Image (spheres, rainbow, N blue to C red):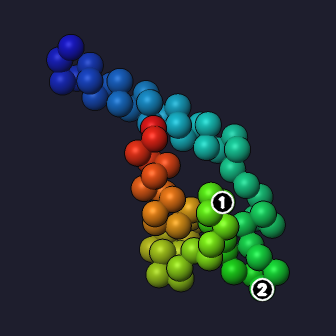
């Protein structure tokens, strides 16, 4: 398998994961606690403001996002 085939395989896996994630994406109401703070869909902890500033549509904290990406 050459480099182009390998890149195409990784791109297909990435796109497949993105489609799966979109299908199970939580609603805006599910992402917020009673105070309106955004919570991580995996660990239910608050997502830090700095992360939301850099990634406004984040649904996972940095640690859970890294674990999720590693599982792809």
Marks 2 and 1, how far apart at CA: 16 Å
- Rendered position, 58 above or below 67: below
Q: Nearer the viewer, residue 12 or 31?
A: 31
Q: Of label 2 and label 1, which has the lower sequence position?
A: 2
- Residue at screen point 44% across, 30% down: 13
Residue 5: x and y in percent read: 26, 19
Q: Can you see residue 54?
A: yes
Q: Specify the farthest residue to the front.
A: 43
- Residue at screen point 72% across, 66% down: 31
Residue 28: x and y in percent read: 75, 64
Q: Nearer the viewer, residue 30 or 45?
A: 45
Residue linked to disc 1: 41
- Rendered position, 58 above or below 10: below
Q: Seen in the image, is 69 located left or right of residue 2?
A: right
Q: Specify the farthest residue to the bottom.
A: 35
Q: Seen in the image, is 22 located left or right of residue 17?
A: right
- Residue at screen point 54% across, 41% down: 18
User: Element type at marker 2?
Assistant: loop
Q: Seen in the image, is 14 located left or right of residue 29?
A: left
Q: Seen in the image, is 40 located left or right of residue 32?
A: left
Residue 10: x and y in percent read: 35, 30
Picture quadrant where residue 19 is located = top right
- Residue at screen point 28% across, 28% down: 7
Q: Are marks 2 and 1 in contact (CB under 8 Å)?
A: no
Please tell me the numbered disc located at residue 8: none
- Rendered position, 14 above or below 32: above
Which quadrant holds the N terminus? top left
Residue linked to disc 2: 35
User: Element type at marker 1?
Assistant: loop
Residue 22: x and y in percent read: 64, 44
């Amino acid at each position: 398998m050459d480099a182009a085939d390998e890149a195409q395989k990784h791109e297909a896996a990435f796109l497949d994961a993105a489609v799966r994630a979109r299908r199970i994406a939580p609603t805006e109401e599910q992402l917020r606690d009673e105070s309106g703070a955004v919570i991580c869909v995996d660990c239910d902890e608050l997502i830090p403001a700095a992360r939301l500033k850099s990634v406004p549509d984040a649904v996972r904290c940095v640690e859970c996002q890294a674990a999720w990406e590693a599982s792809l």
